[in-house]
């Protein structure tokens, strides 16, 4: 397996964001799978009624299996797409926080897939978009998990 240092060594700055999304997606894959077990009609109903408490409960129940409490939470907004030609899809704005890292992102889900789009990455200390930042990004996600499959030690 290639290390992050090797993956990012020859990248331009624009590619670091893509690496962030790949790392985040890998870490929350299990949470997305749990969320996709919830009836999509129920999630859509909660979004239509702007019932953030119910969506937060669903997200927290899914996240608590894999992450420490409070590190991954619903960002209080989302959207859905229901059309005649495609299966329904739901996008939830999410927040990951495990100092020194905060990530604001969208988790989009349909019956066959899930994806993430990062809106903002914030470190408590200023770092350039470098290998150090990517290492800290990955490390913060790993340290927030309660399962050991992502821990390097």
Image (cartoon, rainbow, N blue to C red):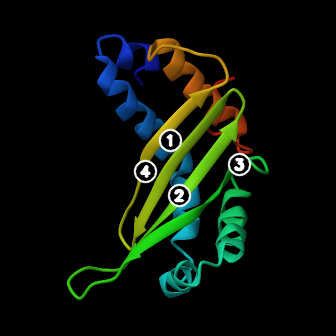
Residue labelled with disc 4:
116
Q: Residue at x 46, y 14 (%)?
A: 131
The x and y percentages for residue 58 are 67, 71
Q: Earlier in the sequence, mark 1 or mark 3?
A: 1
Nearer the camera: disc 3 or disc 4? 4
Q: Residue at x 72, y 70 (%)?
A: 57
Q: Residue at x 55, y 65 (%)?
A: 77
The answer to whether residue 104 is left or right of residue 70 is left
The x and y percentages for residue 41 are 49, 87
Among the 4 quarters of the image, the one containing residue 76: bottom right
The circle drawn on residue 67 is: 3
The circle drawn on residue 93 is: 2
- Disc 3, SS: loop
- Disc 1, SS: helix
How many badges with numbers are in the image? Answer: 4
Looking at the rendered image, the quarter that the C terminus falls into is: top right
Q: What's the CA distance linking mark 2 and mark 4?
A: 10 Å
Q: What's the CA distance linking mark 3 and mark 4?
A: 17 Å
**In the rendered image of this protein, does residue 77 appear above or below residue 89?**
above
Which residue occupies the foreground of this view, 130 or 1? 130
The circle drawn on residue 113 is: none
Q: Earlier in the sequence, mark 3 or mark 4?
A: 3
């Amino acid at each position: 397996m290639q290390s992050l240092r090797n993956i990012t060594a020859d990248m331009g700055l624009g590619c670091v964001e893509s690496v962030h999304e790949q790392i985040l997606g890998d870490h929350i894959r299990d949470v997305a799978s749990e969320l996709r077990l919830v009836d999509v009609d129920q999630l859509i109903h909660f979004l239509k009624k702007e019932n953030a408490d119910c969506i937060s409960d669903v997200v927290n129940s899914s996240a608590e299996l894999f992450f420490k409490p409070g590190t991954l939470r619903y960002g209080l907004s989302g959207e859905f797409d229901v059309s005649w030609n495609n299966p329904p899809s739901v996008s939830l704005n999410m927040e990951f926080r495990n100092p020194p890292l905060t990530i604001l992102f969208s988790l989009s889900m349909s019956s066959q897939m899930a994806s993430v789009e990062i809106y903002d990455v914030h470190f408590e200390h200023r770092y350039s978009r470098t290998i150090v930042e990517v290492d800290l990004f990955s490390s913060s996600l790993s340290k927030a998990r309660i399962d050991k499959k992502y821990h390097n030690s």
